[in-house]
Image: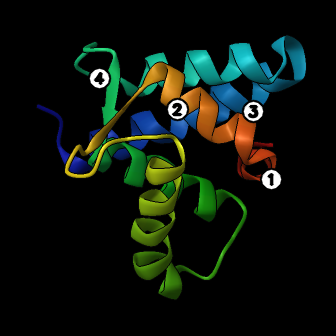
Amino acid sequence: GDTEEEHNRRVSQALFACSHKLQTLGQHSALELAFDDLDVDQNGRLDRHELEALFAAALQHIRLDSMETDVIIPAAIDALMEDAGVPEGVDYVTKDQFLGMFERNPDLMCCFE
């Protein structure tokens, strides 16, 4: 397992890579690559902790007031997971669900640009 610091560094690298790839590859490919980068255990899914880390890094990236992120992020992930059709009680998303989140909520992409 990673230390929190290593994990956060990997999330930041994935985000940075994603924003670079967005410009060259387009959204779908960039998101697929970001998913693969973040799927540390390579099990084809991102758990809630990995999603929260991703959004925390993204919100820092767009300089959102960090005081609120503790409240915003879990609520946002609840809503996104529900929107993606994740059954209640399941705390991870598959790659298709992850891609679907961004397809249905295109304004999320501003976090990664």
| Disc number lying in front (4 or 2) | 2
The label on residue 16 is none
Relative depth, front residue between 14 and 49: 49
Q: What element carries label 4?
A: loop
Alpha-carbon distance for marks 3 and 1? 14 Å
Q: Give the quadrant of the C terminus.
A: top right
Residue 63 spot, x, y in % from top left: 69, 70
State the residue in front, 38 or 103. 103
Q: Which of marks 2 and 1 is nearer the N terminus?
A: 2
Point 11% across, 31% down: residue: 1
Q: In this view, does 9 lie above or below 26?
A: below
| Residue at the spot 72% in from the left edge and 62% down from the top edge | 62
Q: Mark 1 points at which residue?
A: 107
Query: Label 1 sits on what residue type?
Result: Asp
The kind of residue on which mark 3 rests is Ser
The residue under label 2 is which amino acid type?
Phe
Give the mark toward the camera: 1 or 4: 1
Q: Which mark is residue 19?
A: 3
3 or 1: tag closer to the N-terminus: 3
Q: Is mark 1 on a helix, strand or loop?
A: helix
Q: Name the residue under label 4.
A: 40
Residue ranking furthest to the left: 1
Residue at label 2? 98
Is label 3 or label 1 in front?
Answer: 1
